[in-house]
Image: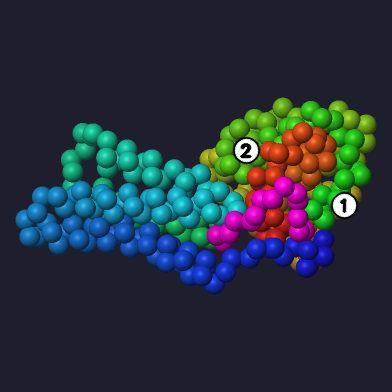
């Protein structure tokens, strides 16, 4: 794809970036700030110090979950931190209410914040959904329409399910969906490429579901599939770049297969257009 086609049609504004930076600072600010206030009050003899520290951790968890939600790649661990905060600090427990637990929790979510910032991409802004495709995504869908038009409706529907569930962060379900797919159409190059996309998505979904790091060896697309891919590998190969680039290409190929292969699934794909556009524009 041409370089100008990969640009995000709605890049984050300076205000958006500034707000996201403040939210990132607010995560350790609330978690450790509540603990500091709790210690100060404890020295004055107040008994509610544990509840103040807990409230700071709960607020920080909600902010972390929001920062995870607005990223193009979802971190399920960060998204679920408010649930664990409620379990630890709100629900009845046999734990002795002291400040050790909030301190450990504050350290943990700060580590998760760093992980989110450097492994799951920059925060994105919403793209207007509309009723039609637009931008570089539409260009890619149009370019791949002819080779994908005869894909079986069943395979196209599985592509819809896999893409939608991946965008929602349900990685275990994505792995199960991808496992059920079998290539049964007549065009071997086309069908092998789509099948490869399902396998790559399955591999990444399994890793994301268990929060595992990049393996030393991983699946990529074969060179003969280059014409069906949205993003081409640059001349100098970086292993991390190649790993995530394979996932972007696999997800975008499934989006195109779903869109071009089964018209009745398009209403389910349109709400996921912002996520697909982010995949197109990511470096």
User: Which residue is pictured at 46% across the width and 66% down the height?
Assistant: 19
Which residue is tagged 1?
Answer: 143
- Residue 267 in picture, x, y percent from top left: 71, 39
208 or 65, which is in the foreground?
65
- Residue 60 in picture, x, y percent from top left: 36, 54
- Residue 102 in picture, x, y percent from top left: 27, 50
User: Which residue is pictured at 20% across the width and 61% down the height?
Assistant: 37
Residue extending farthest front: 131
| Residue 187 seen in this snapshot | yes
Q: Residues within 10 Å of mark 2 (few under 14, many from 20)?
A: some
Image quarter hosting the C terminus: bottom right
Q: What element carries label 2?
A: helix
Which residue is tagged 2?
Answer: 165
| Residue 201 seen in this snapshot | no
Q: What element carries label 1?
A: helix
Give the magenta-colored segment's residue range. Answer: 120-136
Which quarter of the figure has residue 255? Answer: top right
Image quarter hosting the N terminus: bottom right
Which quarter of the figure has residue 34? Answer: bottom left
User: Which residue is pictured at 48% across the width and 55% down the height?
Assistant: 67
């Amino acid at each position: 794809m041409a370089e100008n086609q990969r640009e995000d049609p709605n890049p984050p504004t300076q205000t958006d970036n500034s707000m996201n930076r403040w939210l990132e600072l607010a995560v350790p600010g609330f978690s450790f700030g509540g603990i500091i206030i709790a210690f100060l009050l404890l020295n004055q003899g107040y008994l509610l110090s544990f509840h103040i520290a807990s409230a700071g951790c709960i607020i920080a968890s909600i902010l972390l979950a929001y920062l995870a939600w607005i990223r193009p790649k979802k971190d399920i661990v960060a998204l679920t931190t408010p649930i664990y905060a409620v379990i630890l600090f709100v629900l009845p427990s046999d734990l002795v209410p002291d400040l050790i637990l909030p301190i450990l929790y504050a350290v943990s979510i700060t580590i998760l914040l760093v992980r989110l910032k450097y492994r799951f991409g920059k925060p994105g802004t919403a793209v207007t959904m509309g009723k039609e495709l637009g931008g570089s995504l539409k260009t890619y869908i149009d370019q791949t329409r002819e080779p994908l038009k005869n894909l079986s409706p069943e395979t196209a529907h599985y592509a819809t399910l896999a893409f939608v569930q991946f965008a929602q962060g349900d990685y275990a379900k994505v792995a199960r969906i991808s496992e059920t797919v079998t290539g049964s159409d007549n065009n071997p190059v086309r069908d092998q490429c789509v099948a490869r996309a399902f396998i790559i998505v399955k591999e990444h979904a399994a890793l994301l579901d268990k929060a595992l790091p990049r393996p030393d060896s991983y699946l990529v697309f074969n060179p003969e599939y280059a014409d069906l891919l949205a993003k081409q590998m640059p001349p100098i190969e970086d292993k991390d770049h190649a790993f995530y680039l394979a996932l972007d290409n696999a997800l975008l190929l499934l989006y195109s297969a779903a869109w071009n292969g089964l018209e009745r699934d398009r209403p389910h794909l349109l709400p996921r257009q912002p996520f697909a556009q982010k995949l197109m524009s990511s470096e």
